[in-house]
Image (cartoon, helix red, strand yellow):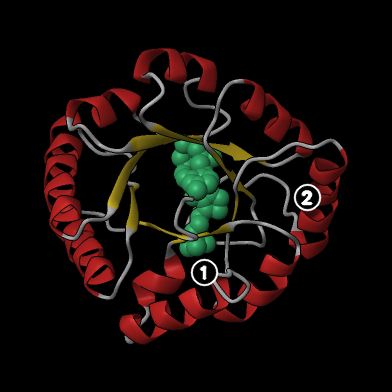
Amino acid sequence: MYNKLQYISQGETIEKQLYNIHLALDAGCDWVQMRFKNQTAKDTFALAEAVKFLCEEYLANFIVNDNLYLAQQVAADGVHLGLSDMKIAEARAILGSTKIIGGTANTYEDIVNHVRNSCDYIGLGPFRFTETKEKLSPILGLSGYYDIVEKMKNNKIQIPIYAIGGITLKDISPLMETGIHGIAVSGMITISDQKEKLIQQLNEKLYANVIV
Ligand SMILES: Cc1ncc(COP(=O)(O)OP(=O)(O)O)c(N)n1
Ligand SMILES: Cc1ncsc1CCOP(=O)(O)O
Ligand SMILES: [Mg+2]
């Protein structure tokens, strides 16, 4: 089972990215998506190598946003691909079955498509407006998650769904009640000055109904 909390990195420079990722790992995050937009190939590669090293040290999962070839080069655990990135089927053909491939969805149809193409998990959103990403797809709100998860159940579509977009602590319980698997967050963890406490609170809510 995939962990229920994915941290999406932030930072305009290699140093800021590494600082944020290091703090998130120290505070207990065990799944990092490296998201470093509009940078040179050289810097992106340098960061990816450093993040790979850090995640190995912390026994955390490491996936790369957008760039499958970079994920391959640094032997990351996988890649997250959006609706305008490389198609999931092509990515699966290149990466094989051992790597994690996540796909973005905004609708039930996106999810069905991704499942057909052997996607491993879905980042479904945005939940609400967020400044972390430009050009957002239509906002789903809580009702959007209820509707989509209901359709999945009715059609026996199974894949872990991660809510994403402007999520705060108080959103976790209502979101989990929709039947999703977990959450992917960037801002909430990056800006927190009490990350360890926050991650503990997030995990308590995310795993509240998991029987061990
Ligand atoms: C877990 C997760 N879900 C969705 C996204 C968004 O991906 P995408 O639509 O490709 O947007 P960018 O992140 O590339 O700006 C994601 N990154 N992670
Ligand atoms: C990458 C992405 N895709 C949809 S919303 C989003 C940003 C999530 O970041 P935050 O948790 O700061 O809103
Ligand atoms: Mg993308």
Apparent side of residue 189 relative to residue 49 in the rendered image (left or right): right
Q: Which mark is residue 212?
A: 1
User: Nearer the N terminus, badge 1 or badge 2?
Assistant: 2
Residue at left 46%, top 51%?
A: 2
96 or 162: nearer the eye? 96
Q: Is residue 179 above or below residue 187?
A: above
Residue at left 58%, top 30%?
A: 83
Q: Is residue 132 above or below residue 74?
A: below
Residue at left 44%, top 67%?
A: 187
Q: Which mark is residue 149?
A: 2
- The CA distance from mark 1 to mark 2 is 24 Å
Q: Which image quadrant is residue 180 in?
A: bottom right
Amino acid residing under circle 2 = Val
Apparent side of residue 18 relative to residue 86 in the rendered image (left or right): left
Q: Is residue 118 above or below residue 82?
A: above
Question: Marks 1 and 2: which is nearer the front?
Answer: 1
Amino acid residing under circle 1 = Val
Apparent side of residue 136 relative to residue 26 in the rendered image (left or right): right
Q: How many marks?
A: 2
The image position of residue 5, as x and y in percent, is: 46, 62
